Amino acid sequence: MTETSAQEFAGKTVIVTGAAGGLGRAFALGFGELGANVVVADMNEAGSAETVRLLTEQGAAAVAVAVNVTSKPSTEALAEAAIQHFGRIDVLVNNAAIYATLERSKFTEIDPEEWDRVMAVNVKGAWLCSASVYPRMSQPGGRIINIASATVFSGSPLWMHYVASKAAVIGLTRVMAREVGATGVTVNAIAPGFTLTEASLSLMDDAATYGVSSRALPRASQPDDIVGTALFLAGERAGYVTGQTLVVDGGKQFI
């Protein structure tokens, strides 16, 4: 880590949704390591407490805030809590999503109620969090980062609701970028490939080798591989990057 990068987020506040574990926790720790104040936003209180503990061990200031991303009052309360604790909001990482608990099935057999839950959390959640945080965000210089998925480009079968939700995240990223650009706030998406989080490892026995042979960089993706992209998009050097979707999958998808 260079001296410049170590100071880049000092005094800034980052909200990470779905930060009680997995990729969300990795994002939180990545920003905390570079000096950010971190708001750990999740419904999992025990997992959030552990993320805060790890951040505190790093020397970062952190607070856990319980949030239901599908509820406007809850996302408003999240944004207000961030302001009350740290006085400002600089970065929002919309990471919360339904993923590992989904049943793979043909699109003709998806439970409509499950479809609605996926859309509510994965799409509506990113919209509501952004709508609540943006008016309170540092302008110019604010950053919204939405977590999509490389499955949008591969069309992963038997998972239509998840793939469709992440395609919608890319769409809302482009619209938001257009609507807020004049204020100097940027909005971008990251589309990770299959990454070895706790959730991914629970999906299959061969998770550690899944898809590796089809990548230009033939190794498993680790959470830190995705975190670096988020740090770039949130940083000053990415101030002229907006409305983009960066695929981070070791070169499996070339789009």
Image (cartoon, rainbow, N blue to C red):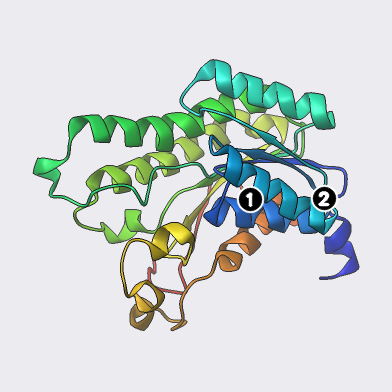
Q: Which mark is residue 241?
A: 1
Query: As displayed, is residue 59 above or below residue 213?
Result: above
Residue depicted at 64% across the width and 34% down the height = 181
Q: Residues within 10 Å of mark 2 (few under 14, many from 20)?
A: many
Neighbor class of circle 1 (other Cα within 10 Å; few <14, some 14-19, many 20+) is few
Q: Quadrant of residue 17?
A: top right
Q: Which residue is mark 2?
A: 60
Q: Which residue is at a point 16% across and 40% down the rendered structure image?
A: 110
CA distance for labels 2 and 1: 27 Å
Q: Is residue 138 left or right of residue 217?
A: right
Amino acid type indicated by mark 2: Ala
Work out which quarter of the rendered image holds the C terminus and state it.
Answer: bottom left
Which SS class for mark 2? loop
The percent position of residue 144, horizontal first and vertical second, equals 62, 40
Q: Residue at x 82, y 44 (%)?
A: 61
**Residue 136 showing in the rendered view:** no
Q: Position of residue 95 (x, y in %)?
A: 53, 45
For marks 2 and 1 on the same chain, the one whose residue lies earlier in the sequence: 2
Q: Quadrant of residue 27?
A: bottom right
Foreground pick, 253 / 102: 102
Where does the image place residue 177, in percent across and percent down from the top left? 56, 37
